[in-house]
Amino acid sequence: MEPIRFVGSIRYWNPERRSGLAVIDIPTEHVGALGGLKQQRVAATLGGVELTSNVMPAGGGRLALSVSKATMRTAGLVMDSTVEVVITGVGRDV
């Protein structure tokens, strides 16, 4: 697959609680290239740090990339950071 590139902000899955899972919303123009609104594994880089993670439906027609706290630490990121994301593999390509 061709790499999917975008810039996104890290947010809490449930922003009202200000805790829990960290995610980055994927722009809607890339959802189709990722196989639609379904959960699956992806290979990506986040601010230059390689990771394997999941994309998952986030409600309202959105797809989100899960970001671990370890990846955030390695990349020097915190909640609300804006970062370049490059998704290089999806599903069986991972």
Image: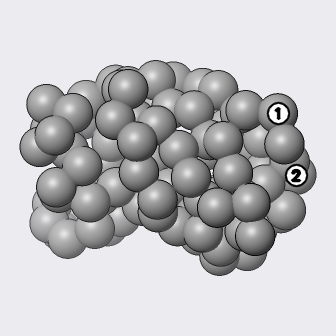
Residue 40 vertical position relative to residue 27 in the rendered view, above or below:
below
Residue 64 vertical position relative to residue 49 in the rendered view, above or below:
below
Give the label on residue 32, or none: 2
The three-letter amino acid code for the residue at tag 2 is: Gly
Q: Do the residues bearing badges 2 and 1 touch, measured as CB atoms within 8 Å?
A: no
Give the label on residue 2, or none: 1
The three-letter amino acid code for the residue at tag 1 is: Glu
Q: Nearer the viewer, residue 51 or 56?
A: 51
Quadrant housing residue 13? bottom left
Residue at 46%, 63% in the rendered image: 53
Q: Secondary structure at mark 1?
A: loop
Residue 77 visible: no
Q: Residue 56: percent from the left, percent from the top?
A: 59, 70
**Residues under labels 2 and 1: Cα distance?**
13 Å
Q: Secondary structure at mark 2?
A: helix
- Count residues near mark 2 (Cα–Cα under 10 Å), then give few for <14, some for 14-19, many for 20+: few
Considering the image in quadrants, where does the N terminus appear?
top right
